[in-house]
Amino acid sequence: MRAAFRRLRDEASITESQREALVEDQRRWVESVDQCWRAREKMRNCVKNSQEQRFQQLQSRAAIYKTIETLKP
C-alpha cells in the first residue's frame, strides 16, 4: 500500500494540485483505518476492506493520470 501511494505521489506526470489532492486523500484514508483500529469490533474486516478499497482507488487514479498524460499535445 505504502509503495503504491509513493509511486503515484512521486509520478512526474501529475500536477501539483493532483499531488496535493492525493496526499489529502491518503490522510483521510489513514484516519479511517485508525477508526477501524479504535472500533475493535470486526477490526480485521474493517482494515482489510479499507486497504483493498484504497489500493483500488490508487490504481484508478494512476490509470487516470496516465490517460491524461497520453492526451497532452
Image (cartoon, rainbow, N blue to C red):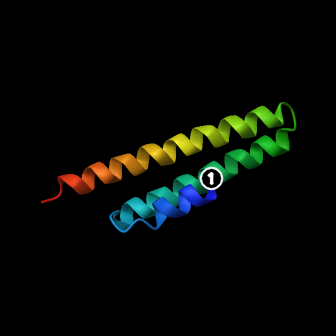
Count of labels in the image: 1
Name the residue: 32% across, 64% down: 13
Image quadrant in which the C terminus is located: bottom left
**In the foreground, 58 or 28:** 58
| Residue type at the position of mark 1 | Met
x and y percentages locating residue 45 in the rendered image: 76, 32
- Extreme right residue here? 40
* Residue 7 as seen in the image, left or right of residue 46: left
Read off the residue under disc 1. 1
Element on which disc 1 rests:
loop
**Image coords of residue 20 (percent x, y):** 45, 63
Foreground pick, 9 / 41: 9
Residue 7 lies, in percent from the top left, at 50, 62
Crowding around mark 1 (Cα neighbors within 10 Å: few <14, some 14 to 19, many 20+) is few
Q: At 43% across and 43% down in the image, what residue appears?
A: 60
Residue occupying the point 35% across, 62% down: 14
Q: Residue at position x 62%, y 53% from top? A: 1
Residues 36 and 10: in front is 10
Q: Is residue 3 left or right of residue 42?
A: left
**Image: 42 above or below 5:** above
The outermost residue toward the left is 73
Residue 63, how many percent across, how many down? Answer: 37, 47
